[in-house]
Image: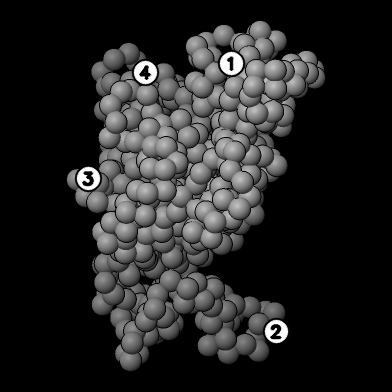
Amino acid sequence: MRLKELHIRDFKRFADLTISDIPESAKLVILTGPNGSGKTSLFEAFNYWMSFLRGHISFEAEYHLRTSGTGSFDAASLLQKIDLQFHDVDNVRNDQERKRKVFYIRSAYRHEPNFAIQNLSAIDDVLNDSHRPQILINQEQRVSDNYQRMVGEAIRALCSDDPVAQQKMVKDVADELIGEAREAMRKIFDDLGLQGLGNPMDKGTFRFKKGTSSGFHYKNLSGGEKAAFDLLLDFVVKRRAFDDTVFCIDEPELHMHTKLQARLLEVMFSLVPDNCQLWLSTHSIGMMRMAAQLKASHPDQVAFIDFHHQEFDQPTTLQPVTPDRNFWQQMFHTALDDLANLVAPKHVVFCEGKRLEKGGRKPSFDAEVYKTIFSPHYYDVDFVPLGGASEVDKDGKTFGHQLVRLVPNIKYWKVFDRDDRHTGEIQKLKDDGTQVLERRDIESYLWDDEVLEELCKSKGHPEKLPEILAEKQQALDDLTKRDKPKDDIKAIANDLYEKCKKTLGLTKCGNNAEFFALHTLAPLIKPGMKVYEELDAIVMALHETKIK
């Protein structure tokens, strides 16, 4: 089961919220935003919808309604305000089996410091999910329930009429049940391993190996270890039955340090069944960095929904976003507050353009173009303009050395336009660690034929491309008559801008070619295009990891 779109009205935090265009391939969906931004309210809408389908309705006007005391609502009418669309089923409400497992939700109130089973009881159908909280501010305890379930499964296997099962030793059955959880724990914890179920007939509880200790009692785990073990164990135990499900976990990072958060997310991502989704709400840097790495290696399987700076008292539509530099700056401010300003990028590219300290409102064109093209794919890079080529050449080293003293692991390099440089000059710059564009300047890439083709397609007029390319070629042919170099695209940019506006019927697209190139053409340059690959090979050549 994978969500495609949702629409929620007058529920909890939302006046009228739509989240659309969730890819069918999205295996992991990350909700990011500060406390109180509405992430839990979204999960509460899922929880209410699921509860209604199960017949376990818990309606509280002061809790569920956006503004209590206004209008007349009941449980059924509130359900009509939650519209969920799925990729693989039109009406799950009519499917008696599937509707039992549409959602599996963990609240942020997960805390079970200790347990020891005194007696065993029959285990119910796992799909009943009898321990789920009716509302997401209720505390939930799943560890002891999962212990009972695993012991029950062991007893059931040992008492089976199956001759093969009867030949198994108790240890074999237990290892078979906890083996997956044990293996997953090895990937998360450096010195903590799941040993077994202990003696379920005598204060039964999970036992661990920790350092040189054996038989380590569950109650002796740290808060972070218990939190991670709870989520991991619950996911391992439930994912076989909930195999057509949207899993939701509110603030999975609670009680854990950054490295543990990242490892937990990586392992859980690997355990998500093929036709399921995992939704997480977080403002954790550890979780987000791992999500970004997963996005880099599985670009179609990770989606980010940004709740920062949204006005949910007004109709709001959200779509998945690509984490760029601005997105990460918001995340750092949410997670670190005043310390966010101390967080430096991992890589800095010095380029041509108006220096940051110069007056005026107009930003550096080259730096802004590079940010637009590369920030969605290289979230740890910043582009810093230092002026003309001579200033970049002179000051780049000075500023770079200062950066390294402040942030020892930072990496920096310079990027120049080719202009009219001789091949010997270019080679000398490259030998000095400076990257040089293969074409005259950044405009040569922005007005490339491939980009113009994407422009025509995006505006619904692919048939207009030949006309625009003919105009471009004619303008290039006329450059020599104007004593301009024959590849000086910047010199004909205004003519191309006017031609595109007129031919494609564009309005409100900016008053000049530079604005149009930055805000309309640059966003069209994406991985998979030859023009992107050429720029990427030069501008980002010294980046440690190619992120596509």
Please report the residue visible at 49 percent of the width from the left and 59 percent of the height from the top. Answer: 432
Q: Mark 4 — residue?
A: 314
Q: Mark 3 — residue?
A: 337
Q: Mark 2 — residue?
A: 164
Do the numbered discs 1 and 4 sit on residues whose CB atoms are within 8 Å?
A: no
Q: CA distance from mark 4 to mark 3?
A: 27 Å
**In which quadrant is the N terminus drawn?**
top right
Vertical arrangement, residue 244 with respect to residue 238, above or below? above
Please report the residue visible at 30 percent of the width from the left and 40 percent of the height from the top. Answer: 34
Looking at numbered disc 1 in the image, what kind of residue is underneath it? Asn
Do the numbered discs 2 and 3 sit on residues whose CB atoms are within 8 Å?
A: no
Looking at numbered disc 3 in the image, what kind of residue is underneath it? Asp
- N-terminal label among 4 and 3: 4
Q: CA distance from mark 2 to mark 3?
A: 59 Å
Element type at mark 4: loop
> Residue 3: in sight, yes or no?
no
Residue 132, how many percent across, how many down?
40, 50
Residue 494's disc is 1
- N-terminal label among 2 and 4: 2
